[in-house]
């Protein structure tokens, strides 16, 4: 319920900002498909954080991985496709926009929004969350689970912010760099999935106590398959889109 209310509020705020932006810049409206992407991203995020899926994630590693796929690979890029950062700097008063751009152009902003920062934090949290006490603590304590999800979303938005740059980007990244970042991200989920699949003992005591050794191990392997098959597919699609955008950019430069 809380996630749904929060999602509706975000969509309403986005719709208001979109209306103001399109009225202020009628020659450069935000495309309808971007609006649809934003709404789908918020809807997928709300669904992933809804009580039914949260309860399923507490009971099953495979369900938990499905939830994490949405938090890592589906909701953030869809939301960013809706150009919310453009609205953030274009709609509020100019003084507010100047503060945002001043931070983005500062030394701290350059470090935070660096492609290397986004990629390294993504990989570190991806591996660390599954091979550290954090995962088990999140299963036992709801507050830690909330912190874990917040961390995932922060890292995912930092990473995808270097890939999906719609309208305004705190640190512009060339198309070639975006494509290579995705190319080198694909093996991370695959290797982690292989590592979890190759493990012949249950890694997380909560699932062991709930399901028993045999069922928990099967569930763990199913979650690993979701991670490397579904996660790899989504990243590959993103890589192909980035490569196509890179090729289109090169063609436009050649024509010019």
Image (spheres, rainbow, N blue to C red):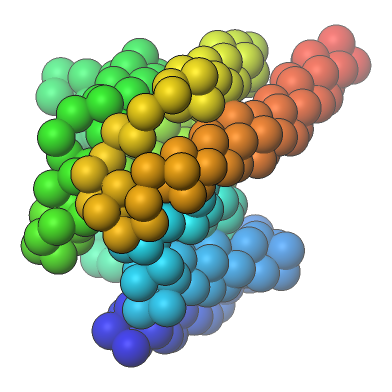
Residue 124 position in % (x across, y down): 28, 21
Q: Nearer the viewer, residue 84 or 195?
A: 195
243 relative to 73 in the view: left or right: right
Q: Is residue 237 above or below residue 15?
A: above
Q: How many marks?
A: 0
5 left or right of 173? left
Give the residue displayed 48% in from the left and 73% down from the top: 47
- Residue 157 can be seen in this image: no
Quadrant hosting residue 187:
top right
Which image quadrant: the C terminus? top right
Q: Position of residue 25 (x, y in %)?
A: 56, 66
Point 10% across, 60% down: residue: 141
The quarter holding residue 243 reads top right
The residue nearer to you, when weighing 64 against 19, is 64
- The residue positioned 19% from the left and 29% from the top of the image is 132
- Look at the picture and state if 64 lies above or below 120: below
Point out residue 150 in the picture as x, y percentages from the top left corner: 23, 53
Q: Quadrant of the N terminus?
A: bottom left
Q: Is residue 93 above or below residue 60?
A: below
- Residue at left offset 14%, top offset 65%: 142
Q: Position of residue 250 (x, y in %)?
A: 79, 14
Up-down: is 3 above or below 144? Answer: below
| Whether residue 214 can be seen here | yes
> Left of 29 or right of it: where is 243?
right
195 or 68, nearer to the observer: 195
């Amino acid at each position: 319920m809380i996630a749904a209310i929060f999602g509706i509020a975000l969509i309403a705020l986005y719709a208001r900002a979109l209306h103001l932006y399109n009225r202020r810049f009628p020659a450069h409206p935000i495309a309808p498909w971007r609006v649809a992407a934003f709404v789908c991203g918020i809807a997928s995020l709300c669904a992933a954080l809804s009580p039914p899926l949260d309860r399923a994630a507490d009971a099953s590693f495979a369900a938990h991985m499905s939830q994490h796929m949405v938090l890592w690979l589906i909701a953030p890029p869809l939301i960013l496709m809706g150009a919310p950062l453009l609205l953030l700097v274009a709609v509020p008063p100019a003084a507010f926009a100047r503060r945002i751009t001043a931070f983005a152009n500062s030394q701290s902003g350059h470090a935070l929004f660096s492609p290397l920062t986004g990629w390294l934090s993504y990989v570190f949290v991806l591996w660390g969350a599954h091979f550290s006490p954090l995962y088990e603590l999140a299963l036992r304590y709801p507050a830690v689970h909330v912190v874990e999800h917040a961390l995932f979303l922060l890292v995912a938005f930092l990473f995808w912010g270097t890939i999906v740059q719609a309208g305004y980007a705190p640190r512009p990244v060339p198309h070639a760099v975006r494509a290579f970042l995705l190319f080198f991200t694909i093996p991370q989920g695959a290797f982690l999935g292989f590592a979890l699949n190759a493990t012949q003992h249950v890694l997380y005591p909560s699932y062991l106590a709930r399901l028993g050794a045999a069922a928990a191990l099967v569930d763990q392997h199913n979650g690993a398959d979701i991670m490397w098959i579904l996660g790899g597919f989504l990243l590959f699609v993103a890589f192909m889109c980035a490569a196509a955008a890179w090729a289109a950019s090169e063609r436009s430069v050649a024509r010019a």
